[in-house]
Image (cartoon, helix red, strand yellow):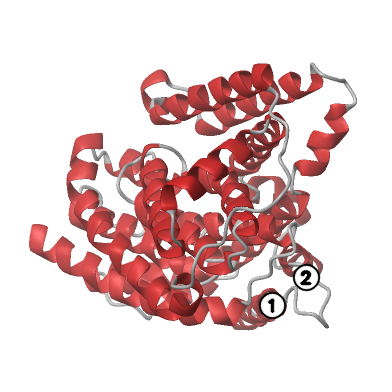
Amino acid sequence: MVLDTILITAAVFIFTYALISVANLPRIRISRGLAAAIGGILVLILGIVSVADVPDLINIHVIFLLIGMMMLVAGLEFSGFFRIISDMLIKRSGSKVRMLAYVMIICAVLSAIALNDAIVLMFTPIVIRCCRNTKSNPIPYLIGVMFSANIGSLATPVGNPQNAYIASEAGISFIDFVIHAVPISLICLPIAFFFIYMIFRKNLTSDMPAPAGKDVPVDRPRLWATVSITVGAMIGFALSDAIGIDIYVIALAAGILALLVVMSKSPKNIVWVAKKVDWMIIVFFIGLFILMGAVVTSGLLDEMASVFPGFGDGRTPSVLSVTAFSAVLSNIVSNVPAVVLIGGLLPEGNMMLWMTLAASSTLAGNATLVASAANVIVAERSENDGISFNFWKFAAIGVPVTIVTLFIAAGIMMLIF
């Protein structure tokens, strides 16, 4: 009976990821959000997960974080913030390849000091506007946003949710975390840039045309208000542990304040903001959370763990074993759930293995479109602007980048410790 449940869960999982991989193809009109929701519904119908357990499986903190940040991004768009930043980026760059470098460096640095999911929510529309105004192919730049947000977020405990969890669970101080993680980020970022450049060099070496497009009005009073709220939110993210306020609370408060700023011009603008919230992203994560619950409750996770030495056999896992298991699981259930699941299997007080988990789970997020929340956010937000990502074409770039950077991270960890 247990074996049957595991096999059924595995079948549902494979089916769901097959749907996600072909989502948004011209002849298949199904979004990734709907594909994940179908997987979640199937495990409920099949009784692998109980309906009563659903509230416990859905990470409401992540949901509130995303909703809050999307409302904040809507406020920035309403005030003309994206127009100003994109115009500055175009003028400073001067060439397409230099613009890619600037995009990746800025996104990586910002992702290190604030939550990478929040950064990509704000940066995606900026990049899309830059590309449209210069008639550039947006795909390499948006991939650059994904890669650099993941790599940059590795550098600090506040860069992404899994780092925050690891630092808290393993008792790793901010300074110790940074000392061990920053060298990996500094080495891996130019490697990711090199891969993107080599694959898209024909798009990146052509001349950058003069910016085109209509001017978007800037509402300066509301611009200053929303920018102030954004800066306050970023500071709040960085100091969340010190002040004892959860990141999702800060994000939701910032989003509500931005909504009030937009509504100060007209109460009817609440509808405009509601439309700017990408509800399909929310549906995607809800479906994925339920599916992840099925992986755990069915025993599929235990079966997967037993394949890797040091997990379930009474021995202590090695750096390479943690790296491999983390990379595989991060591309099945996304990196945040993977860290929570693997963290429960690691020995306490082993800083080397916990830092290895942080590095491997974050870098593995570059392998596929669904391996990290940042990737999903960029892909789904881009879909709203008519820019589609092919699951397999992305993997053809992401997997090599991930393999190379994972080997580098594992080597640095073994060298440091």
Q: Earlier in the sequence, mark 2 or mark 1?
A: 1
Query: Would you place residue 388 above or below residue 27 in this image?
Result: above
* Image quarter in which the C terminus is found: bottom left
Q: Which residue is mark 1?
A: 12
Indicate the position of residue 89 as horizontal and vertical percent values. 48, 46
Query: Would you place residue 410 above or below residue 133 in this image?
Result: below
Residue 42 image label: 2
Residue 347, can we see it? no
- Few, some or many C-alpha atoms within 10 Å of disc 1 (few <14, some 14-19, many ≥20)? many
- Few, some or many C-alpha atoms within 10 Å of disc 2 (few <14, some 14-19, many ≥20)? many
Indicate the position of residue 17 as horizontal and vertical percent values. 64, 76
Label 1: state its secondary structure. Answer: helix
Residue 392, can we see it? yes
* Image quarter in which the N terminus is found: bottom right
Q: Residue at x 43, y 61 (%)?
A: 147
**Horizontal side of residue 319 vs 158, given as left or right:** left
Q: Hey, which residue is sitting farthest right in the picture?
A: 268
The residue type indicated by label 2 comes to Leu
Indicate the position of residue 388 as horizontal and vertical percent values. 68, 70
Query: Marks 2 and 1: CB-CB under 8 Å?
Result: yes
Residue 245 image label: none
**Horizontal side of residue 381 vs 240, given as left or right:** right
Res 339 → quadrant: bottom left
